[in-house]
Image: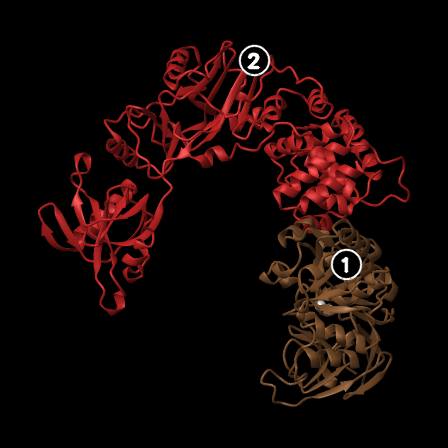
Chain colours: A brown, B red
């Protein structure tokens, strides 16, 4: 028998499952990839086989057009859907189970089992309720491979209701203006819209063109977003007193000149830090994150209670220190190509 | 405190000046006395609580948060107050109600170094994260949210529809929370009586000279020193030092507070002793002042160490006197005020004051030459003051001009060199340089565009002289033509069309800004780029 956990090996571009010759969220094209969710730093095109939830596969197909082909778009690849809760058998006697991660539509943690050893890779996750995706489930395991995007004790995300209330208040206070909300096109935008609807805001919401297809995809998967309109189809005056959702890159762009006196808002966990908001010229910071905050990260580790914690990306130093203080065995993997998501 | 915290939070995210003014004005209208006065003092950085320092906060945190996690967090957030406000452990239940700004000011004022570590936590426990941020900012000073005293005064004027000049007059004469100011502004009471207070008088300012030429018979010239313009005021034995914006900077330069031997208001440049501006003290350029960098070390401090006072002692180079021993000279001509200032000098300690010397010139051309001859980048240029001008607040056209060395820049190639005169007669120190008349890679030529003999150090002069001797192509009397190998970054005031030059251009006051030993000559500028800078 080989040494414990020698079958799972962290490499700079992803976690390698050796007996299955398979990678989790690899940063380069490989023969066989298990993908946790559709964000670009986890899901890349060009793999031989891609195992992901049907929702994630649909997102990848939309984002990379030919979906699972490489950049030239020529090499056909195989997409293998795995439902939440489903277990698949990989070569080399490795079982993989996809478990909801609560991050964005279709996001999954992946439980890997081999030779009686259990490893969970969270991908990105959060513990707060989110009307656009299935909630995170705590899964006991030996090695817990976690993200740490907001892994600093300063990060306590406020209840989303408070932030949505700030947004609707800005609108009522400024009926002649508009509020332009910068939100990540996959996940954040749809969550903000769904939460606005839940808070009783039923007016049409205007979208930047880059948001439209992803919103439609969410609706096709059963997430109700209410009446959505495209900014390009409407006049300045029609949009007064409305919420407009655009990718963060459009906030200070020429594009925003077509909007009626926009108040610039941004929905991101980074908005907790004043300097970050000022840097981006944000007037109305909305602290809304699709990642676990510090308390969620540490509580989850306690609940999962693994023998070892591996940290994939984010502010790993502080989480390592927390593990050290609690006498938990932990290491940082220093994966390449992972970005500070949640923009 | 909640309203103040909310104001602070909104101001942080507001970039528009008008919006900031409206926010502060709203707050001042809606907040009762004395909270609004204290808030105003806090916004403009006039509150000081010696018992609470940034280190007090750090120490409080180190008892509550693991030091490694604290440091990682502080580094990420970039601001101690903000990090502490976020990391402060939320109490189980908030004890007591949220204190008002006045209560906070009162409690902070009563703290000393021993009680602060015990009392501050109880105060922090009564506030949420935003409130804690506001409290810590208020207690440690330095809001750093882009609210200048000027902006706050304008907001006050806007809130109560009074003149900002009047607000300016009263402001610094009064103490926070400024009850007299609000009684006058907000409640329509009598204007505050400030006649016996060391108050700020708005400065007289200058216009840029641009293409105007003045007659030296009508205008006096002085060097424009690169320090900070200040006003030193003494009334009833009490002194204050004000910056150009009317901020009270007395605490930053305590050595200047007890040195005026009589009640007076004087205007001058605050400088630090040194030899970077105009060289050591001398007849020609006056000199005796350190670079602005040296002064910079002393700006923005609330307390000054003995070491600083010894290493970078400040002094005032006097330009003007507004009031002396009760006599207001502001209506008088500059010549009269200058005479009064000169008469005053023997009574002032030369350790802390000197007189800004006048620059004598035969005519405007000569003045231009002198300005050029001060080969010192640290001197900003010249000030030209109409001899009959009264001292008037603000900028009035035609009275005072600043003739700044605010150069245009171009890269040109060294073509000819000529021996200098006087002590530089053994060096090739006058340089003619040129720009390309087209693409140098397809056979364009260099055409001379100007001549410069200043802007380099003695060491650089030696190096240039050597280069000229080593690369000489031709000799014409005192002039040598050299190989085209060296690029100068040339600074100049303006460029005009000229029929007298082959390039069709004439530069005004060119000087060597930098020697580009590293730059290949084909990368020097073309005539057309120089022509694009013509603004006739
Ligand atoms: Zn993600
Ligand atoms: Zn990620």
Q: Residue at the location (82% across, 66% down)?
A: A194
* Viewer-proximal residue among B32 and B43: B32
* Viewer-proximal residue among A273 and A288: A288
Labels 2 and 1 touching (C-beta < 8 A): no
Q: CA distance from mark 2 to mark 1?
A: 56 Å
Q: Position of residue A71 (x, y in %)?
A: 59, 82
Let me know if residue A260 appears in the view: yes
List the residue tagged with mark 2.
B235
> What's the chain of the residue with tag 2?
B
Q: Residue at the location (82% across, 59% down)?
A: A298
Q: Position of residue B352 (x, y in %)?
A: 45, 19
Q: Position of residue B432 (x, y in %)?
A: 21, 49
Q: Residues within 10 Å of mark 2 (few under 14, many from 20)?
A: some
List the residue tagged with mark 1.
A288
Q: How many marks?
A: 2
Residue A227 position by quadrant: bottom right
Q: Residue at the location (66% across, 71% down)?
A: A210
- The answer to whether residue B221 is left or right of residue B102 is left
Image height of B407 relative to B212, above or below:
below
């Amino acid at each position: 028998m080989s040494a414990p956990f020698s079958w799972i090996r962290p490499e700079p571009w992803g976690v390698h499952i050796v007996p299955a010759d398979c990678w989790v969220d690899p940063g380069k094209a490989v023969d066989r990839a298990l993908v946790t969710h559709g964000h670009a730093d986890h899901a890349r095109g060009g793999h031989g086989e891609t195992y992901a939830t049907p929702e994630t596969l649909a997102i990848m197909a939309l984002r990379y057009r030919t979906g699972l082909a490489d950049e030239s778009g020529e090499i056909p690849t195989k997409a293998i859907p795995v439902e939440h809760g489903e277990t698949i058998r990989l070569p080399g006697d490795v079982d993989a189970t996809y478990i909801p991660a609560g991050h964005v539509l279709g996001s999954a943690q992946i439980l890997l089992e081999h030779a009686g050893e259990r490893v969970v890779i969270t991908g990105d996750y959060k513990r707060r309720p989110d009307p656009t995706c299935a909630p995170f489930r705590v899964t006991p395991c030996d090695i817990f491979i976690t993200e740490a995007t907001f892994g600093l004790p300063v990060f306590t995300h406020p209840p989303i209701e408070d932030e949505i209330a700030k947004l609707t208040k800005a609108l009522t206070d400024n009926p002649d203006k508009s509020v332009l909300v910068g939100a990540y096109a996959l996940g954040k935008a749809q969550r903000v819209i769904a939460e606005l609807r839940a808070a009783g805001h039923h007016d049409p919401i205007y979208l930047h063109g880059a948001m439209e297809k992803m919103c439609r995809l969410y609706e096709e998967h059963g997430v109700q977003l209410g009446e959505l309109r495209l900014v390009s189809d409407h006049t300045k005056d029609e949009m007064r007193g409305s919420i407009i959702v655009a990718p963060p890159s459009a906030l200070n762009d020429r594009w925003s000149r077509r909007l009626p006196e926009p108040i610039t808002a941004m929905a991101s966990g980074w908005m907790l830090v004043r300097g970050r908001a000022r840097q981006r010229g944000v007037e109305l910071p909305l602290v809304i994150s699709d990642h676990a905050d510090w308390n969620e990260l540490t509580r989850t580790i306690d609940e999962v209670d693994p023998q070892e914690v591996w940290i994939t990306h984010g502010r790993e130093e502080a989480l390592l220190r927390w593990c050290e203080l609690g006498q938990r065995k932990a290491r940082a993997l220093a994966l390449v190509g992972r970005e500070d998501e949640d923009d | 405190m909640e309203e103040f915290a909310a104001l602070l939070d909104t101001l942080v995210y507001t970039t528009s000046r008008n919006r900031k003014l409206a926010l502060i004005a709203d707050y001042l209208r809606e907040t009762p006395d004395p909270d609004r006065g204290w808030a105003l003092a806090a916004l403009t950085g006039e509150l000081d609580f010696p018992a609470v320092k940034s280190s007090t906060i750090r120490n409080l945190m180190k008892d509550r948060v693991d030091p490694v996690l604290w440091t990682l967090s502080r580094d990420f957030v970039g601001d101690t107050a903000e990090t502490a406000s976020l990391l402060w452990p939320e109490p189980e239940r908030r004890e007591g109600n949220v204190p008002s700004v006045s209560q906070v000011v009162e409690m902070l004022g009563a703290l000393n170094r021993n009680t602060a570590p015990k009392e501050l936590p109880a105060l922090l426990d009564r506030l949420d994260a935003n409130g804690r941020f506001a409290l810590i900012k208020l207690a440690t000073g330095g809001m750093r949210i882009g609210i200048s005293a000027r902006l706050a005064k304008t907001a006050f004027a806007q809130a109560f529809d009074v003149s900002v000049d009047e607000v300016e007059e009263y402001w610094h004469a009064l103490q926070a929370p400024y009850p007299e100011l609000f009684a006058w502004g907000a409640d329509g009471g009598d204007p505050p009586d400030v006649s016996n207070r060391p108050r700020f008088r708005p400065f007289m300012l200058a216009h840029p000279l641009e293409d105007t030429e003045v007659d030296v018979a009508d205008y006096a010239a002085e060097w424009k020193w690169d320090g900070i313009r200040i006003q030193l005021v003494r009334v009833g034995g009490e002194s204050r030092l004000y910056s150009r914006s009317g901020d009270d900077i007395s605490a930053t330069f305590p050595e200047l507070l007890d040195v005026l031997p009589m009640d007076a208001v004087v205007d001058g440049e605050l400088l630090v002793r040194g030899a970077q501006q105009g060289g050591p003290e001398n007849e020609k350029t006056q000199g005796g002042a350190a670079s602005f960098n040296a002064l910079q070390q002393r700006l923005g401090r609330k307390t000054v160490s003995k070491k600083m006072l010894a290493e970078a002692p400040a002094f005032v180079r006097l330009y003007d006197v507004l009031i002396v021993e009760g006599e207001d000279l502001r209506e008088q001509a500059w010549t009269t005020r200058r005479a009064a200032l000169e008469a005053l000098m023997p009574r002032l300690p030369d350790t802390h004051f000197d007189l800004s010397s006048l620059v004598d010139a035969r005519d405007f051309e000569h003045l231009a030459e002198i300005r050029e001859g001060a080969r010192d980048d640290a001197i900003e240029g010249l000030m030209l003051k109409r001899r009959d001008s009264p001292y008037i607040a603000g900028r009035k056209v035609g009275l005072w001009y600043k003739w700044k060395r605010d150069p245009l820049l171009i890269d040109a190639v060294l073509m000819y060199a000529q021996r200098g005169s006087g002590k530089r007669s053994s060096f090739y120190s006058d340089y003619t340089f040129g720009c390309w008349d087209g693409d140098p890679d397809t056979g364009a030529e260099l055409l001379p565009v100007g001549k410069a003999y200043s802007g380099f150090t003695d060491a650089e002069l030696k190096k240039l002289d050597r280069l000229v001797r080593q690369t000489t192509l031709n000799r014409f009397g005192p002039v040598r033509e050299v190989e085209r190998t060296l690029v100068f970054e040339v600074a100049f005031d303006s460029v005009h069309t000229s029929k007298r030059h082959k390039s069709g251009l004439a530069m005004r006051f060119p000087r060597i800004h930098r020697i580009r030993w590293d730059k290949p000559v084909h990368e020097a500028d073309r005539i057309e780029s120089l022509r694009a800078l013509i603004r006739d």
